[in-house]
Amino acid sequence: MKRLLPLIILCIVISAGGPAFSDSYLKGVDAYRRGDYQTATPIVSRLAGQNDPRAQNLLGVMYFQGHGVQRDRDMAIKMYTLAAEQNFAKAQYNLAKLFLDQTNNPSATKTAVVWLKKSANQGLVRAEFKLGRLYEDGVGVAQNGEKAVKWYKRAAEQGHAKAHYRLGYIYEKGKGVDKDIHRAFKWTKSSAILGFAPAQALLAYNYYNGDVVPQDFETAFKWTKMASDQGYTMAQHNLAKMYADGQGITQDYGKALKLYSLAAEQGLEESQFNLGVMYLKGQGTLSDTIHGLMWLIISSSSGNDLFNKKRLPIEAAMPASDVKAAQKLAQEWLAKHKK
């Protein structure tokens, strides 16, 4: 464990213009990124005392995370404020985030919006996106779809994949703007191209069902696989179904079983049920009624009536000893994965 160093903030404000000043900051940042807090702390602390907004912002991060110093939210706010008042966009954003965390404090939320606007107006993409989300949801500001679109578009112009995705959602639902499924598709596709897994999965869904574009299972498979490869649970489930059904790809129960297993372990009920059915039928594996029933029990454990109705007759037809074994395995899995 790294030793916590006492911070000595110099009171004398020194001009921050020379190369040596900048070099010191870079050394501090490099040490911080390596996790060498013992080296980073005195460098960053000294520069923060010399009124360097970059160092003040980083010191705020260190206080907030407890990296090299005792975790102290109030000191984080103090450091962020010093940098934010010098118009340092990243500090303004970090300060806004801390105030937004105070969910039951309208005054704090209002202050957060002020700082977020200052940061966004300087072009910080994270601030632009967050401000768009506040306008979309009506948090700290009056809900306004047009302003949400404005800020999302600014973030999107800087390649922010989630901003593209939110624009797609707004146009799809008509949230404060005229509903436009073609614009929605365009923004969803651009988000998918930028690598955002939920957008890739949604784009695949459009191709799979023939929404907006002609039905195309092969293209649906391509985008589903991209999202699945990123570990996106719903895409893993959908890809498993495509392998099981042979849609867009040659039927492969083995791959379907593997993908359903991945999604099932992450708690997706639909995958848990389908995995159980595959074990019962011996698809992609040897028939295993105990593990099959185990997954059916798990899938209906949160009260899914449909899965429960389908499970009961299967359970009734099995030997009591197998049912007991499956119930034991299910209870062990649920205890291990208790939320």
Image (cartoon, grey):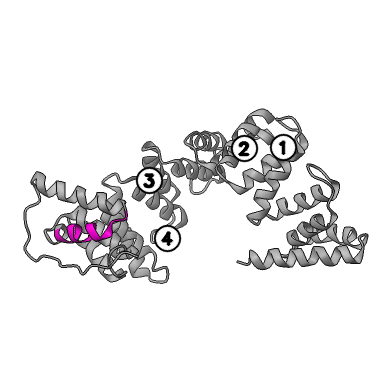
Q: Is residue 212 above or below residue 271?
A: above
Numbered disc 1: secondary structure: helix
Q: From the image, state whether disc 2 or disc 3 is nearer to you.
A: 2
Upstream in the sequence, badge 4 or badge 2?
A: 4
Q: Position of residue 31 (x, y in %)?
A: 26, 52
Say which amino acid is labelled 1. Answer: Met
Magenta stretch containing residue 198, yes or no?
no
The residue that appears at 39% across and 48% down in the rendered structure is 129
Q: Nearer the viewer, residue 89 or 225?
A: 225
CB within 8 Å, label 3 to label 1: no
Q: Nearer the viewer, residue 93 or 301?
A: 301
Q: Alpha-carbon distance for marks 4 and 2?
A: 33 Å
CB within 8 Å, label 2 to label 3: no
Q: Position of residue 298 (x, y in %)?
A: 74, 61
Task: Please say whether residue 209 is visible from this viewpoint.
Answer: yes
Q: Alpha-carbon distance for marks 1 and 2?
A: 9 Å
Q: Which residue is mark 2?
A: 224
Q: Where is residue 216, by image quadrant?
A: top right
Residue 151 badge: 3
Say which amino acid is labelled 4. Answer: Val
- Magenta residue span: 35-46
Q: Alpha-carbon distance for marks 2 and 3?
A: 29 Å
Q: Which residue is mark 4?
A: 139
Magenta stretch containing residue 43, yes or no?
yes
CB within 8 Å, label 1 to label 2: yes
Say which amino acid is labelled 2. Answer: Thr
Residue 242 badge: 1
Task: Please say whether residue 216 is visible from this viewpoint.
Answer: no
